[in-house]
Image: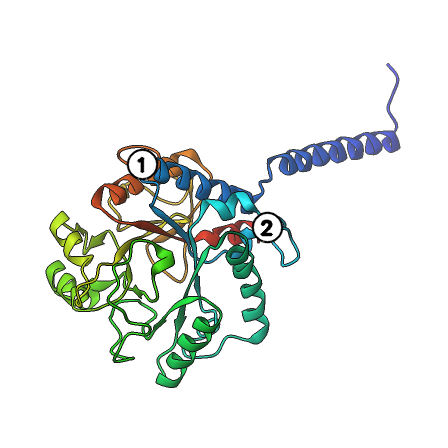
Amino acid sequence: MKKVSFKSACLLLFLFIFVSFYSCKKDEVSEEKDYKQEMRNFVQDISVYAKAINPSFAIIPQNGANLVSLTGDETGSPDLTYINAIDAIGQEDLFYGYDNDDLATSNSDNKRIRTFLDIAKNNANVKIMVTDYCYTHSKMDNSYSVNNGLGYTSFAANHRDLDNIPSYPNAIYNENDDTITSLQDAKNFLYLINPDNNYATKQAFVDAVRSTNYDYIIMDYFFNGEEFTASQIDQLKQKSNGGKRLLICYMSIGEAENYRYYWQSNWKIGSPSFIVKENSNWAGNYIVKYWESEWQNIIFGNNNSYLKKIIDAGFDGVYLDIIDAFEHFEE
């Protein structure tokens, strides 16, 4: 039997390790996903499903505005498939709150985000809905003024928790008694998704909202774990001055929340497979592999899905949060 020299053995071992490493890396590359496109696909599928049931149902992703660009950067061509699937973009922190509440957003960040917002606005008349986080009255005034000047509809939230109806300004910016039948008609809005922090009962919350004249409300499907009744939904759609408004329901699609009806007691990170990690800034919120079918089946596509519950409850649209979850996986 011919002996293999030590030098030859080392060379063979090196070749084996190299080939194994290359094969593993090749497999990793083949399994990599276009995380932006996966989120676009998710939103587009949600839109198709919802509009097949109610063609006027509004689809509003929050943040992740760079999805409107095919390349995800400011020089990319518009992704018209995505843009045409949505009715509005909700954008937080455009003029105030990007780094800290009540602090002006830097000009560079503001300009970068507005580039994407205007791609959507100019290519498909997508409505831009800005939530700035500021509480100094002069900054709230400025937020409303500059957003309005750009053709954006805005809300100056004086609580990051979105748990109150601001007492300032005393008259709602661009207040009117119109009956609002579409987002394009709306001139103002209220973003109030944590009412159980300040209201003792569902009806107390309903009464507080009903006493206002906002054109549409972004709210949660639940109040302290309880659904709103059909009667309460109807009441919430009435402005105090006699006009009617739209109700938009908040729904997170980039994170699972352990206080939602769908959460199972035995769920944990890695089980189900779509649960990745807990959000370090929001306890009980878990980043998900949003492209996995098991998660998407919870969100839409069947009679037991979250979105179907929202549609059946009588809401006029859905406000999709954690759209920018793709950033976690890209990083």
Badge 2 marks a residue whose secondary structure is loop
Q: Amino acid at mark 2?
A: Pro
State the residue in front, 274 or 127: 127
**Horizontal relation, residue 183 to residue 68: left or right:** left
Quadrant into which the C terminus falls = bottom right
Other residues around mark 1 within 10 Å, as few (<14) / some (14–19) / many (≥20): few
Q: Quadrant of the N terminus?
A: top right
Which residue corresponds to the image point at 28% horizontal and 39% vertical from the top-left?
308
Residue at the extreme top: 1
- The image shows residue 307, relative to residue 107, as above or below, that is above
The answer to whether residue 79 is above or below residue 242 is above
Q: Is residue 289 visible?
A: no
User: On residue 183, which mark appears?
Assistant: none
The type of colouring in the image is rainbow
Q: Is residue 119 left or right of residue 244?
A: right
The answer to whether one can see residue 209 in this image is yes
Considering every residue shown, the one lying at the far front of the view is: 178
Q: Residue 144's x, y, as percent? A: 40, 75
Residue at 70% in and 36% down: 21
Task: Find the distance from the CA under tag 1 to the CA under tag 2.
Answer: 27 Å
The residue that label 1 is drawn on is 53
Residue receiving disc 2: 78
- Horizontal and vertical percent position of residue 209: 19, 65
